[in-house]
Amino acid sequence: MTTERVYLFKRFERFWHWSQAALVIALLITGFRIHGVISGFDVETGIRVHMYAAWALMALWAFAIFWHFTTGEWRQYIPTLDRAVAVARFYAWGIFLGEAHPYHPTPEHKQNALQRLAYLWVKILINPMIWISGLALLFMALNWTTLESARPFGVSLQTLAWAHTIAAYMMATFFVLHIYLATTGATPLAHIKAMITGWELNEQ
Amino acid sequence: MKPTASDRINSARLTSWAAALAICALLASGASAETATAPTGAAPLAAAPAGTDDPALQPLKLQRAVPRANGPWTPVDHGKFAALKGPFKSPRDVTSACLTCHTDSANQMKSTIHWTWSKKDPNTGHMIGKANVFNTFCANIKSNEQFCTVCHVGYGDPDPAHFVPFNERAENQVDCLVCHDRSGKYKKIPFLGGNPAVERTRVRPGCNEVYGTEEPYVDPPDLAAVAQSVGAPKRENCGGCHFYGGGGDGVKHGDLDSSLVKATKALDVHMDANGLNFACETCHVASNHLLAGSHYEVDAKPTGGALMRGSAHGGNPASCQSCHGDMPHKKSTLASTINMHTRDIACQTCHIPAMARGGVATKMKWDYSSAGKFGPNGTPLVLNDAKGDNVYWGVKGTFAWGRDVIPQYAWFNGSEDWMTNGEKLHPGADGVVEVNRISGSATDGKSRIWPFKIMRNNQPFDPVNNTLTIFHSFGFDDDAFTISGDWNRSITAGMKDAKLPYSGKFSFVPTRMYWPLAHMVAPAEKALQCAECHADGGRLASVAGVYIPGRGSDHQPWTERLGMLAVVLSAAGVIGHGLLRIMMWLRRRRGEAA
Ligand code: HEM
C-alpha cells in the first residue's frame, strides 16, 4: 500500500473549519443549557455566550458563502452518486478489514458522495433553519406572547423555538457522526491533521 | 517608608505645579507692580473680619437635594404659629386651627378615598373601597366601623356604639394629625371612632399592638405639641395604618411592614435609610391631598419612557416606569435580552424576589371556622408558635404566617372584580371564593405577569342566600363575636346593620384574596436570576400563554424524544463501529506479527 500527499484545504478553509467548530460546540453547549437539558453553569452565561457566538457564526458564514462563490468551491457540494455504493460498503465492511478508502480526494473533488450529501444537508437545511429561526427568536422575542399581533409572519415564538431546537438536535447528531468520521482516515488522525496542515494522505 | 509609585507621581506633579506657579507669580508681580501698591478704594470681598457669621461670607457649599424618608423640608415652622399654641380641648379643635390657614385641605381630603372609603370602579361600575368590599382578614367593615375607623382620616363619635357616617361629618372632623404629626406622639385608639384617647383609656386585653402601647392603658396625647410638630408625612405616618392593616404589623400586605421604617438596602433599594431614603410620597406623589397609586387602580402595564418631573403628563408617578422607563436595563451585556421581558413581566416580578423580607411575618392564612375556643382561665385561647407568631386566637381563629415568602404569579391587567356587600359568591376555578378576582391574560395586550401575596381564609357565609356574611366582630356589646363567640348572633347583627338578608344558616367557605406586590424592591444584584423561571418547576411553572425557554412543559415532546434518540443512537453507533474497528485492527496486527 502506498500513500500520496495532496494539498486539500486552503488556509481560509482551515480557518473557517476550526472557528466554525469552536462556535458550533459553544452554541450546542450553551443552547442546550438554555433549553434546560444540560446544567453546570448558569443560564445568564449560556445566553450571553450563545448570543455572541451566534453573531460570530453568522458573520463567519457570510464570509464562507462569499468565499465559496468567488472561488467556485461551492461546486464541491453538488450531489453525486459516483462511487456512493463503494463508499458505503467501505464504511460498513472494508474499513474493518483494513482496506484502502475507495475514494481519493483531490483538490477539485474533496468530498466523496456520502460527504457531499451530508454537508449539503447541513448547508441547505440545518444551517438556514438555525440561522433563520435563531435570528427570528432574537428579534421576535420582543413580542413573545401568543398575542396575534405578536406574530408578524404568522409564527409564534414557540414555533420558532421548536424549529430552532429541531435544527439544534440535527446539528448535535451531525456533530457526533462528524467527529467519529474524522478518525476514519488512513490513520486515525490523518483527516484531523489534514484539516490543520492542509495536507491529506491518500492510500492507494 | 518607601515612596510608592503614586507618591512619586504626586511629588513630580507638585514640583511642576510649584515651578509653574513661581513663574506666574514672577510675571504677575512684574506686570502689576504699580496697581498692587495703589489704594483700591473698595473693601476686598474676601477680607471679612475674623469670626463673622454672615452666611454670605461662608465658603461656597452646594446644596444636594437628598430625598428624605421624613418628606421634604418646608420653609415653615409650625411651632411658631399662634393658632397652634393650644391648649386644645379636642382633636377637632386642632383641625379647625389647621383650616384657618389651609382653607381647602379638609374639602380636598373629603373627596379622596382616604376619607370616603368608597369609589366607583371604572372597570366594573361597582362601588368599591373598604366600605363596600370583603377581604379575607376581618371580612367586612359594616357594623365594626367604630373599631375599623382607627385607620380612617376622620373623627367620629368617641362612643364605641355610635358610628357617624363619613358624609355627615363636618370639616373639622378631618384628621390632619394622623398623616402630618412628626412628633410620633399621636395615636388613634380603636373603638373610639377614629379619635385619639381623650382620657386615660384601658387597653383591651390582647390588643396592645393596635393600641400601640405595652402599657395596660393609654393616655391622651399632648395635642398642642403634636400640632406644632406637623409637616410632611413620615414613613411612620403612612405606616401607622398601611404597615399594620389586618390587625398588626405586616399582617395584611406582605410587602409593607414596620421593617421599612429604617429599611436596609437589601430590603428596599429606594427606602434604604443610608441610601436613597425615599419617603412614601416620593413615589405616591400627592396633589390636592390625592395620592398617586392604589390597590383599586393598579397600572399593570405602564409603557413608554420615564416621565419628566414637572411636565404635564397623564402618567402615574407611583409606577416603576415613571422614573425608569420601560427599557430600564442598561448596564448588563444582557440588557436588551432583559429589556425584552418588560413587555410581559412586571418589574415587581423579578425585583421583589420574596415578600416579608424584613423579619416581620405576614399572615398567609386565617381560618375563622376554628374560632371560639376559650382557655382554662375563661378568656379566649391564645397559642403562639416557637417563633412567637400567634397561631390561634379564640376571638379570630387559626393563623399561618410566613417570612421570606415566594410570591404567586399570574397575568394581571390591573382590573379586579371585587365582591361587594350582598353579592353572590365568586367561586374560582377550584371552588375557592375569590373576593377580588384578578383579570388578565397573555393575549389581552394590557397584562403583565405580576407577583401576588395570596391570603386565604375560611370564612362564614350564608349557604341559602349564597353570600358571604357580614358579622359584628368588634365592639363591647354582646352581639360582638369577640365578646360572645356566638356566630349566629354576630352574623344576625352584622347583616341587619348592612340591611342584607340572612337566612339564619351559616357555614364556612374557603376564600382567597390577591395582593399585588409593589414594595420591598430589592437592589439589582438581588433580583431574580434567569434560572428562577427559565427551568422546569420554576416560579412561572403554572403561568400559561407564554413560551419560556428552559421550561420543559413548553417543549415539543416529540422533538425532544426523537432528537435525543438521534443523538444517543449515533453516539452508540459510532462507539460500536469504533470498537469493532479497534478489535479488527488488533486481530490484523496479531496476524501480521504471527
Ligand atoms: C450551531 C448553532 C446553534 C445551535 C446548536 C443552537 C442551539 C440552541 C438551542 C438548543 C436553544 C434552546 C432553544 C429553546 O429551549 O428554546 C437555542 C436558543 C436560542 N438560540 Fe441558538 N443555536 C445555534 C445557533 C444560533 C444562531 C445562529 C442564532 C442566531 C442569532 C441563535 C439564537 C438563539 C436564540 C435567540 C435562542 C433563544 C435564547 C433566548 O431566548 O434567550 N442560535 N439555541
Image: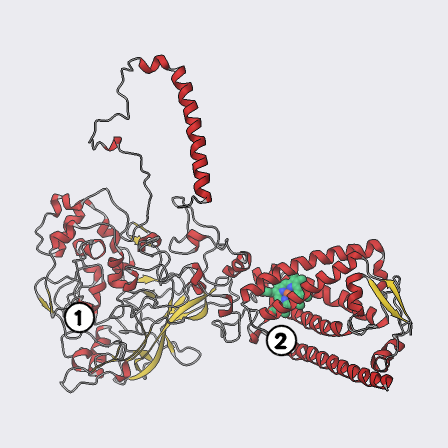
Residue at x-position 42% and y-position 52% = B322
Label 1 chain ID: B
The image's colouring method is secondary structure
The mark that comes first in sequence, 1 or 2, is 1
| One can see residue A149 in this view | no
Q: Which of the two residues, A57 or B105, is positioned nearer the viewer here?
A: A57
Label 2 chain ID: B
Q: Amino acid at mark 1?
A: Asn
Q: Are marks 1 and 2 on the same chain?
A: yes
To which residue does mark 2 refer?
B556
Residue A194 quadrant: bottom right
C-alpha gap between disc 1 and disc 2: 58 Å
Measured from the top left, where is residue A63 in percent x and y?
A: 75, 55
Work out whether A62 lies above or below B41: below
Q: Which of the two residues, B96 or B518, is positioned nearer the viewer here?
A: B518
Q: Amino acid at mark 2?
A: Gln
Q: Secondary structure at mark 2?
A: loop
Tell which residue pokes out farthest to the front in this image: B1
Q: Secondary structure at mark 1?
A: helix
Residue at x-position 21% and y-position 72% = B143
Quadrant for ligand 1 reads: bottom right
Residue B388 quadrant: bottom left
Measured from the top left, where is residue B292 in percent x and y?
A: 34, 55
Residue B473 shown left or right of residue B38 in the figure = left
Find out if the beta carbon at label 2 lies less than 8 Å from the nearest ligand 1 atom.
Answer: no
Pointer 1 local density, CA inside 10 Å: few below 14, some 14–19, many at least 20: some
**Quadrant in which the C terminus of chain B is drawn:** bottom right
Measured from the top left, where is residue A152 in percent x and y?
A: 63, 60
To which residue does mark 1 refer?
B208
Residue at x-position 87% and y-position 84% = B592
| One can see residue A106 in this view | yes
Residue B297 quadrant: bottom left
